[in-house]
Image (cartoon, rainbow, N blue to C red):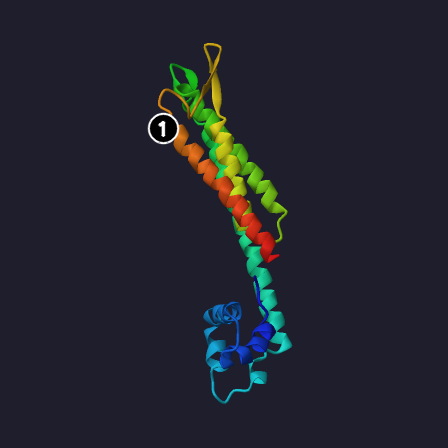
């Protein structure tokens, strides 16, 4: 949560007099850690609180810098998703020539591997297109939501063998499936907890 300096200045008298609540003290001290120069000025014995106030032009410049940084993070994140999506898509079409025939490397021995990478590829393309419309960096609970969706999709990867469904992570040795399922549950739990926290903070 972004706290304006004017709010912190209004809290300083109660903070320095020792009358502030624990929540107020934590808020002021967090701000001090973020702006050590401001803390040094605030703790000056002869510094009136009016001197701590930032001119409007400086506040506008700080807001502009903050907005620029958010836009930069959105662009970089979107670009990262794009390059990863392209990479995984190209891997699906990797091939070699054997006996004058094209052999698809990922699909030659294990159809499951190809399906799994195709799932990741589709997931990354969805992430890229969804991130293009963002105006702010993706929030923590949204990141966990996407990861939970990905792990859930991976658990659903299967092929048909001898007229039966064969699940990639739940073969003769189900340990890998149990681990991935545990991580999936953990991702969903983290998503719901972080989303609830985000709603409380507004």
Q: What element carries label 1?
A: helix
The C terminus sits in image quarter: bottom right
Residue 67 appears anywhere in the view: yes
Q: In this view, does 82 lie to the left or right of 91?
A: right
Report the residue at 38% width, 25% height from top.
174
Q: Name the residue under label 1.
A: 175
Residue 53 percent across, percent down from the top left: 59, 79
- Judge by depth and name the residue closer to the eye, 193 or 129: 193
Callout 1: 10 Å neighbours few (<14), some, many (20+)? few
Residue at 54%, 47% (x, y): give it: 141
Q: Total marks drawn?
A: 1
Q: Position of residue 177 (x, y in %)?
A: 41, 28
Question: In which quadrant of the rendered image does the N terminus lie?
Answer: bottom right
Residue 69: x and y in percent read 55, 60
The reply to whether residue 138 is in sight is: no
Q: Which residue is drawn at 50% across and 71% down?
A: 25
* Residue found at the far bottom of this picture: 46
Q: Measuring from the top left, give residue 94's x and y in whole percent.
A: 44, 27
6, 12: nearer the viewer: 12
Q: Which residue sits at x=54%, y=33%? A: 122
Q: In this view, does 161 lie above or below 76?
A: above
Is 106 located above or below residue 10 in the figure?
A: above
Q: Which of 169 and 126 is in front in this view?
A: 169
The furthest residue to the top:
162
């Amino acid at each position: 949560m972004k706290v304006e300096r004017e709010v912190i200045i209004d809290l300083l008298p109660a903070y320095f007099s020792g009358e502030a609540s624990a929540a107020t003290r934590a808020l002021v001290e967090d701000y001090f850690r973020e702006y050590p120069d401001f803390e040094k000025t605030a703790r000056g014995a002869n510094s009136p609180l009016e001197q701590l106030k930032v001119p409007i032009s400086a506040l506008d410049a700080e807001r502009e810098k903050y907005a620029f940084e958010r836009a930069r993070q959105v662009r970089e994140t979107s670009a990262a998703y794009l390059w990863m999506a392209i990479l995984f898509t190209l891997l699906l079409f990797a091939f070699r020539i054997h006996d004058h025939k094209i052999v698809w490397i990922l699909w030659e021995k294990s159809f499951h591997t190809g399906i799994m990478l195709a799932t990741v590829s589709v997931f990354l393309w969805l992430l890229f297109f969804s991130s293009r419309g963002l105006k702010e960096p993706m929030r923590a609970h949204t990141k966990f939501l996407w990861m939970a969706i990905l792990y859930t999709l991976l658990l659903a990867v299967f092929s048909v063998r001898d007229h039966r469904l064969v699940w990639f992570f739940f073969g003769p040795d189900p340990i890998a499936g149990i681990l991935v399922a545990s991580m999936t549950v953990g991702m969903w739990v983290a998503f719901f907890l972080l989303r609830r926290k985000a709603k409380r903070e507004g």
